[in-house]
Amino acid sequence: MEAVVIEDLFKGNQLEELRHWLDNETPYWEDQTWERSPSGVMKKTCAELNTYHIATIDKARDIFAVHDLLPTFSTLNWYEQDTNHPIHKDSDPIEYTIMYNYYSDGSWNMNINGENFTLENETAIAYYGSQQNHGRLQNPGGVTVALYFNYAKPDNYHFALGEHSSGEVMFPSNRHEFEVEKDWL
């Protein structure tokens, strides 16, 4: 599957509500809802984001041609610094991704499988993150606000309550991935 640019991930009243929400969102409120990473990226998960994630499922299933695709998790990312975003492949509950560039002061340059893409504001890109090398080439400078919607096939360990950390799946029972048969479908 090649990466796909999506011009209209959100439209109409859904887009207007998204704009209203994100134009009033900031990691600088003292509400402790944002996670600040050492790389300078600030991330947030919340109910509003989950609602938009669920709203993208049908479009994701069509784009990726996986008609039982399920949402795993989503994040709202706020970038300000010119941090290093190396080319990589995703793992664990991130098999497929739709990344939505809500706002950036400059064009957002992504590389997916050696192909460069430029994303303008309110444009998304869909890619098979666990199989395709990808990464943000550089921070365009200033503020960038992006939404990441991640999906996986139903047999992903995430759906059997597997918690992913350091590239290894851990279950509440303390069993490892190789000890757990995929029999929950």
Image (cartoon, rainbow, N blue to C red):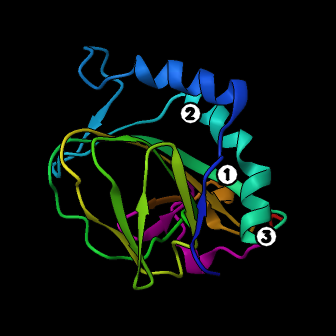
Give SS at disc 1.
strand
Q: Which residue is mark 3?
A: 66
Q: Marks 3/1: CA distance?
A: 12 Å
Which residue is at a point 74% across and 73% down the rendered structure image?
A: 182
Q: Position of residue 81 (x, y in %)?
A: 15, 47
Q: Does 41 lie within the magenta span? A: no
Task: Tell me the crowding category of disc 1: few under 14, some 14 to 19, or many 20 or more residues within 10 angstroms, Cα based.
Answer: many
Range of the magenta residues? Answer: 165-182
Residue 131 drawn above or below residue 62: below
Classified by dominant secondary structure, the portion drawn in magenta counts as loop
Q: Amino acid at mark 3?
A: Val
Q: Are the two marked residues, 2 and 3, in contact with CB atoms closer than 8 angstroms?
A: no
Q: Position of residue 34 (x, y in %)?
A: 32, 30
Q: Position of residue 88 (x, y in %)?
A: 36, 76
Q: Which residue is mark 2?
A: 49
Which residue is at a point 25% across and 14% down the rendered structure image?
A: 30
Give SS at disc 3.
loop
Task: Please identify, in this view, whether the residue under mark 3 or under mark 1 is nearer the observer.
Answer: 3
The answer to whether any part of residue 37 appears in the image is yes
Q: Position of residue 4 (x, y in %)?
A: 60, 68
Identify the image quadrant of residue 93: bottom right
Q: Which residue is mark 1?
A: 71
